[in-house]
Amino acid sequence: MSDRAAALLAALVARGWTVTTAESCTGGMVAAAITDIAGSSQVFEQGFVTYSNTAKIALLDVAPETLDAVGAVSEEVVREMAEGARRRAAATLAVAISGIAGPGGSEHKPEGRVCFALASEHAEIFSETVEFGALGRGEVRRAARDHALDLLLKAAKSG
């Protein structure tokens, strides 16, 4: 994991870009991975852990109507989370994550479903849903962290 974060840091520094995070099910794991690397203060100023819907609305400007219509674990919500975080942090890139880490889930939103969004000053918002499966809470969270770092790294390298 530190290799991913170190590569991300190097790519961001090379471009002069900054990054922020908007995390729900990962609870700050992406921000922690980034800030574990010495020198991360060059590219990372703040992140947002918005576990509740109330926090998503208050801190990231997620529309209550979106949450009511599709729920927190949706591409629509993570797109709003990513753009809200990017804007609030005045960052070049933002990644947002919301999912069902487990245990449990439902027929419509099973354990291991995680939605991601990437907002950038340089591109349209990207979002996707990944089905990690019922790996267990810790493994789903780690897989989501690593996937988010990979999305950021790809964006930082490709511009």
Image: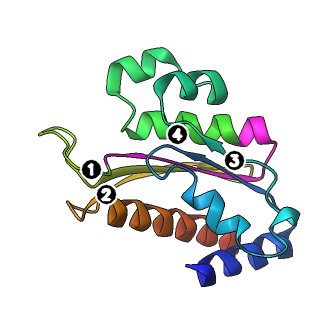
Distance (Cα) linking label 4 and label 3 = 16 Å
Distance (Cα) linking label 1 and label 4 = 22 Å
Label disc, if present, on residue 102 of the rendered structure: 1
Q: Residues within 10 Å of mark 2 (few under 14, many from 20)?
A: some
> What residue did someone put label 4 on?
79
* Foreground label between 4 and 3: 3
Q: Is residue 69 above or below residue 22?
A: above
The amino acid type, in three-letter code, at marker 2 is Arg
Label disc, if present, on residue 4 of the rendered structure: none
In the image, residue 52 lies at what x, y percent?
48, 29
Labels 2 & 1 near each other (Cβ < 8 A): yes
Query: Who's the residue at 21% across and 61% down the image?
Result: 133
Please report whichever mark, 3 or 1, sits nearer to the chain's N-terminal start: 3
Distance (Cα) linking label 2 and label 1 = 5 Å
Q: How is the image coloured?
A: rainbow
> What residue did someone put label 2 on?
137
Left or right of residue 66, residue 21 in this image = right
In the image, which residues are magenta? 86-100
Please report whichever mark, 2 or 3, sits nearer to the chain's N-terminal start: 3
Quadrant of the drawing holding the N terminus: bottom right
